[in-house]
Image: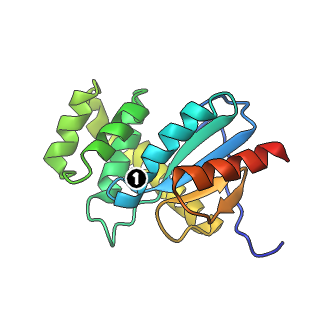
Amino acid sequence: MNGIPFLATPVSVADHSRGPDDAALIVVEYGDYQCPYCDAARIVVDELLKNFRESLRFVFRNFPLADVYPHAKKAAVVAEAVGLQGKFWEMHDVLFDNQWQLDDEALLRYAAQVGADVHQMMADLGSGALRRVESDFESALRSGANATPTFFVNGVRYDGPLQYQPLADYLQEVLDQ
């Protein structure tokens, strides 16, 4: 191996994903809900999903940098707890839309806004949701992620620019291989 980090935890049905399960391109992001670079990358990913509709599966995994972003881990755990109710992507989007306000009161309000059962969400915070965030975090570290966002394309870390065109060009190159 040439020193390029590889995805340590393969994508599975347990992952939160958008796009076809059998896509030729699997893009995994390790991200943080408070990170402004992750929010900017979300816009790029949305455009990629539109333009690579049939060939791209996007997976989001939690990599909360709690030392940098004080509400990052709690936001990730809430997203996972709401995800247990089938509303992960709705919560994901609301958290990024409001990343400047992720205190406890706001997180409860956002969960209710996306139609989650807030009492159930509260019950799920300390169990599966927290374990999921911790598991994603460990997977990120084992995969060589050291910043947010970190992307992997078909299991190989992508270290290029996180603007649309360079990433789209790279994805097209991978498709053409």
Q: For the N terminus, give its image quadrant.
A: bottom right
Residue 64 at what x, y percent from top left?
Answer: 40, 60
Instruction: Residue lying at the far top in this picture: please name it.
Output: 115
Residue 56 at what x, y percent from top left?
Answer: 65, 36
| Left or right, 148 with reference to 58 | left
Residue 86 at what x, y percent from top left?
Answer: 43, 26
Q: Nearer the viewer, residue 24 or 168?
A: 168
Vertical side of 131 occupied by 83: above or below: above
Q: What residue is shown at x 32% (from left), y 57% (from top)?
A: 34
Instruction: Residue lying at the far left in this picture: please name it.
Output: 105
Residue 8 at what x, y percent from top left?
Answer: 69, 59
Instruction: Residue lying at the far bottom in this picture: please name it.
Output: 3
Q: What residue is shown at x 66% (from left), y 40% (from top)?
A: 12
SS at mark 1?
A: helix
Label 1: how many Cα within 10 Å (few below 14, some 14–19, many 20+): some
Q: What residue is shown at x 26% (from left), y 39% (from top)?
A: 122
| Left or right, 137 with reference to 174 | left
Residue identified by numbered label 1: 40
| Left or right, 98 with reference to 177 | left
Q: Nearer the viewer, residue 7 or 27?
A: 27
Say what amino acid the circle numbered 1 marks: Ala
Vertical side of 60 occupied by 13: above or below: above
